[in-house]
Amino acid sequence: MSQPRILFFGYSEVGYECLSLLLERGDHVVALITHQDNPHEKIWFKTPAVAAREKGLPVFTPDSVNTPEWREKIAALRPDLILSVYYRNMIGTKILALPRLGAWNMHGSLLPDYRGRAPINWAVLHGEPRIGMTLHRMVKSADAGAIVDQEGVEIGPRDTAEQAFRKVLPCARRVLARQLDALLAGTARETPQDEAKARYFGGRKPEDGRIHWTQTSRQIFNLIRAVTDPYPGAFTDLGAARLMVWWAEPESPATAGRRGRPGEILSVSPLVVATGDGALELTKTEWRGTPADLRVGGSL
């Protein structure tokens, strides 16, 4: 009996790890559908195209698979199973209905919480102590299908989003390794998601890194660690110049007992700024544009 034909949709290092697992196992992957790297995005991760090209696997990068032309091309690949891992675009229901063994997605959260884009960044921003990876059936609504398996990991209150990503990355490969044989045999067990516990978050844009000084020190610190390098970063504007804030300290000797109106500069060296409930020491910054004149009593 021939092996089931797997069509892999994927991107990011999670996609790289999961595709590598399939290729190491000798599963019959017929093609990779992925994205062209965005020249405006810092590519700090491995991508599945690297693993695919090493094995001579066909690689396709359509802007959308939900066109008549691409639906026809995908149908011609005769997939028995579709696996999506960090593919960034929605896959239409006509494509999801093609494989006899179903279509499955690996999502970077402990569903049903943090559906949608950038789940790890959102989780860090909200100060979550635990994140994870979930394998689930793909349905019309994003990340809403029944769960097959998930695995979580603890993250620390000072972890950046990249550090959190590195901690949770192995969970995806372990979950997929546990469930692949069942998926390919059509025997995977599924548990419907609890819609009452579902939360959805949209994609993040660079503008979402703007600091709102009326928030608490912890909220601002969580934003900074959620979007610091290699992500676009948190920032505040002063005149025509932009101050990028790559790191800060919510509890340091320089902030102890300091209060002021939100955004007020309480100290220049070190740079300490008042928040909604105290102060934050900005320890790693970068000016974009002509540096503004910082002075005690001024405002960001």
Image (cartoon, rainbow, N blue to C red):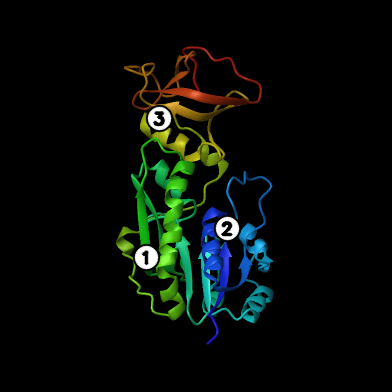
Q: Nearer the viewer, residue 73 or 27?
A: 27
Label 3 sits on what residue type?
Answer: Thr
Marks 2 and 3, the one that precedes in the sequence: 2
Image quadrant of residue 174?
Answer: bottom left
* Count of marks overlaid on the render: 3
Q: SS of the residue at dot 2? A: loop
Horizontally, is 62 left or right of 248 in the view? right
Residue 219 on image: x %, y %: 39, 35
Q: Nearer the viewer, residue 280 or 52?
A: 52
Q: Residues within 10 Å of mark 2 (few under 14, many from 20)?
A: many
Indicate the secondary structure of the residue bearing disc 1: strand
Residue that carries the numbered disc 3 in the rendered image: 214
Camera-nearest label, 3 or 1:
1
| Residue drawn at point x = 52 percent, y = 29 percent | 245
Q: Which residue is mark 1?
A: 149
Q: Answer few, some or many: residues within 10 Å of disc 1's Cα (few below 14, many 20 plus, some between 14 and 19).
A: many
* Amino acid on which the number 1 mark rests in the picture: Asp
Amino acid type for the residue under numbered disc 2: Tyr
Q: Which residue is mark 2?
A: 11
Q: Label 3: state its secondary structure.
A: loop
Would residue 63 be visible to someone looking at this image? Answer: no
Which image quadrant is residue 59 in?
A: bottom right
Spot occupied by residue 78 in the image (x, y as percentages of width and height): 60, 81
Q: CA distance from mark 2 to mark 3?
A: 37 Å
Q: Position of residue 65 (x, y in %)?
A: 63, 69
Q: Is residue 2 above or below residue 265?
A: below
